[in-house]
Amino acid sequence: MPKHLVSINDLSKASIEKIFDLADDIDEKLKNHQTIDLCRDKIMATMFYEPSTRTRMSFESAMYRLGGKVISSADTKATSSAAKGESLIDTIKVIQHYADVVILRHFNDGSAKLASENSLVPIISGGDGSHEHPTQTLCDLYTLRREKGKIKGLNIALCGDLRYGRTVHSLVYGLAKFGATIFTVAPDDFALPEHVERRLKSEYGTEVKKFKKFDEQLSAKDVIFMKNLKKGKAVKDDVIEENLFQPIPIEYFDAIYVTRIQMERIEGTKSRHESLMSYLVNKELLEKAKNDTIVLHPLPRRSELSYDIDKDKRAAYFKQAAYGVPVRMALIAILLGVTEDKIKMTFDKSKDCILDEKCSNHNCITQEQENVQHKFIKVEDVENTYRCFYCDSEKIVQN
């Protein structure tokens, strides 16, 4: 059976580290202009139903640098038979005979999972709706490892649109795997989805520290938490002093991960976009950060990340984009089995609970595709709550 990557949860920490080790080796060979022909005679198909610059081009560059070939559909929704009403399932069942691996970006949540169920060749998600973007997370984690030397124990601030931004939904799980401390900075309308928080807690034992603004006044308990964190002490309840209130101190963060508002996925964008202006990461804010704090952004950016820090040594977002090539080269090589490196994939299988209920997420792929059996997984320790097998959205089902 082919190995697919549709969620960062498909990969264990050990598997991710194997990908990174191979990426290190590949990156060194690229710098030395060495030929890498691991994928000679292999073909990759890129199917993008949504616009893309970095993901599509870095995947295509990766395959060419591996000695393989690429067939590409950069606007699949408009230029393929999807425009004639062809279903994703039928498209995949055809394309699998034309290529050895398929990179899929789709506007529906859970589309990559559905594609993987109907493909004889590896499916790699290039982002599906507001659901996940696992290979972006590989690039993010790899950047942290390269630029900071480690991931465990880092204090990471995730700010911006955390509700609709698929990169963050994958990243929080990846950070939890590696033992980072996660802070979220977002207004209520853009907070991390509850089902993501719940899964973080139930499967990784991780809870995020949530704030609305960088200048938000901390509670006394939060101040104690961050004081202990800075001193490397175990975080526990301390005696609360009323005079400890203060703004979120930027100097606590080892990395600031900025995301743009996902205007294409929400309504009422103008007013909500204005509410995010306080997340502008600029020179003034960065002056308060540590000298070795790095700023990350999956790009493209809008007004949330100022151009005036591009030349700052702590601005790592263009390195982050560049690392996408060796990381994706390593991933392609491993999934195609052309290297000695082997990884185990972890999928939701035996816990499937088949229900006659439709997914409550209006953008779930099951809402768009006919003849798809709706599958849900019971959420542990939460009564009558089930998680969609495809998009991970939760719903309450009364027995």
Image (tube, rainbow, N blue to C red):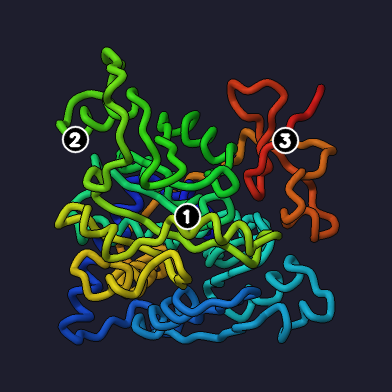
Residue 166, above or below 177: below
Q: Amino acid at mark 3?
A: Lys
Label 1 sits on residue: 160
What label sits on residue 394 in the rendered view? Answer: none
Q: Going 52% across and 46% down the picture, which residue do you hit?
A: 187
- Res 389 quadrant in image: top right
Q: Position of residue 191 (x, y in %)?
A: 54, 44
The correct choice, above or below, for 229 with respect to 104 in the image is above
- The label number, if any, that marks residue 395 in the structure image: 3
Label 1 secondary element: loop
User: Which one is nearer the viewer's eye here, 202 or 339?
Assistant: 202
Kindly state the secondary structure of the residue where label 2 is placed. helix
Q: Which residue is mark 2?
A: 230
* Amino acid type assigned to the residue bearing label 2 in the image: Lys
Q: What separation in Å lies between label 2 and label 3 (alpha carbons)? A: 39 Å
User: Badges 2 and 3: C-beta atoms under 8 Å apart?
Assistant: no
Marks 2 and 1 sit apart, C-alpha to C-alpha, by: 24 Å
How many residues crowd around disc 3 within 10 Å: few (fewer than 14), some, or many (20 or more)?
many
Vertical arrangement, residue 204 with respect to residue 286, above or below = above
Determine the residue positioned at 22% across, 53% down.
Answer: 288
- Residue 245 place in picture, x, y as percent: 31, 29
- How many numbered marks are there? 3
Query: How far across and how far down the image is residue 80, in percent?
Result: 72, 83
